Each structure stands twice: as structure tokens, then as C-alpha cells.
Amino acid sequence: MTDEFARAFRFRVALTQSAAGPGTGPGAGPTLGTGGFQECTGLDLEMDVGEYVEGGRNNGVVQRAGRAKLSRITLRRGMLHAAGGRIDGTLWRWFADVVDGVRPLRRYDGTISLLDARQRPIGGWTFVRGLPAKLVGPALNGRTGEIAIEELQIAHEGLRLEVT
């Protein structure tokens, strides 16, 4: 095993406004931000499998593919930065707009890029039409001055592995 892969994964997250409707590819709209997080979970797919009992076939059951189940992408302990590296409230406004019923509903596509030791992308995942499902701010502590997002959960409509 090389030293590069023996180290912990490094990754970067970017959110870009989705294209108009369901079934469209990743958007090229305005960027909500790019950032780093300590942990990312929810990069999994599960498929419903239906069983079909075929008459006269007693030695097995036909397995049929069904719908995919998507987990929420969960990002923990990190921060999204707007263009230029400054911190702004766009993420919080996005969540508030969804809760307040502001229409049209803004959705964001995401890219989770795995980085090598030199911070170059080596692959990753993309998800489409994300909505903020949960946003947890930091526990405020005057000694540390932390301003990171404790947890961000994003519900989405599709997940793909991207290989570079």
C-alpha cells in the first residue's frame, strides 16, 4: 500500500444550482459554495428487489430490479465558502427559504471530490437536485471561536460515482 492511500481521505464539496427539472444533469448555475468537511456519509444506494414466484418453478424465485433508495448525504464539521473564500449566510438562507416555502424551490447539485496529497481531484461522487434536510450550527464556545457547520444533511434525487 502506498503512503498516499495509507493516509486519511481528503475531499472537497461543491454545490451548484440545479438545472430546471427532474431528470436533468448536473447544473451549471450559480455556486452556493465550496468547502471542506471532516466527515461525509450517505454515499450509498440500495435497490428494492421484488420476488416473482413463477408457476412450476420450485427450485427458486425470480428476482426483479426495483427502485433505488438513496441515503441523505451527511456532511459533518466543516464549512462552505463563497467565491473568494469569504464566509456568508447563503447556505442558511437556502435552508430558510425552503422552510418558508419560497418558490421556485432552489435545488443544488453537489460534487464530492476525493483529493490526493497535493489536493488534486482523483475521483468522487456527484448528486443531483439536492434539498437541505437538516442543518446544525456549531456549539458556541468563547474559547475556541469555532464557526463551522456541525452537520448538513442533503436529500437528493440521484448519486453517481465519477472516475477521473
Image: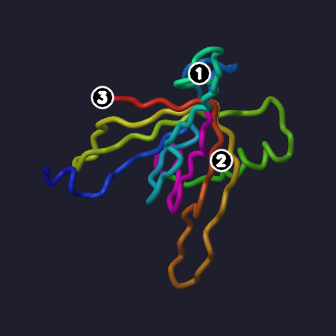
Choose top left, top right, bottom left or bottom right for residue 46.
Answer: top right
Query: Which numbered disc covers residue 90?
Result: 2
Q: Is residue 62 left or right of residue 13?
A: right
| Camera-nearest label, 1 or 2 | 1
Q: Secondary structure at mark 2?
A: helix
Q: Amino acid at mark 1?
A: Arg
- Residue identifier under label 1: 64
Residue nearest the viewer, comparing 97 with 158: 158
State the residue at coordinates (62%, 76%): 140
Residue 137 vertical position relative to residue 104 in the rendered view, above or below = below
Is-magenta flag for residue 73? yes
Residue nearest the viewer, comparing 9 with 14: 9
- Find the magenta span and give its range: 68-85
Q: Secondary structure at mark 1?
A: strand
Name the spot of residue 111 as percent of width and height, x first: 47, 36
Residue 39 vertical position relative to residue 73 in the rendered view, above or below = below
Q: Amino acid at mark 2?
A: Thr
Which class describes the residues within 10 Å of circle 2: few (<14), some (14-19), or many (20+)? Answer: some
Magenta stretch, main secondary structure, is: strand
| Camera-nearest label, 1 or 3 | 1
Which class describes the residues within 10 Å of circle 1: few (<14), some (14-19), or many (20+)? Answer: few
Q: Are marks 1 and 2 in contact (CB under 8 Å)?
A: no
- Residue identifier under label 3: 164
Choose top left, top right, bottom left or bottom right for residue 65.
Answer: top right
Q: Secondary structure at mark 3?
A: loop
State the residue at coordinates (48%, 52%): 40
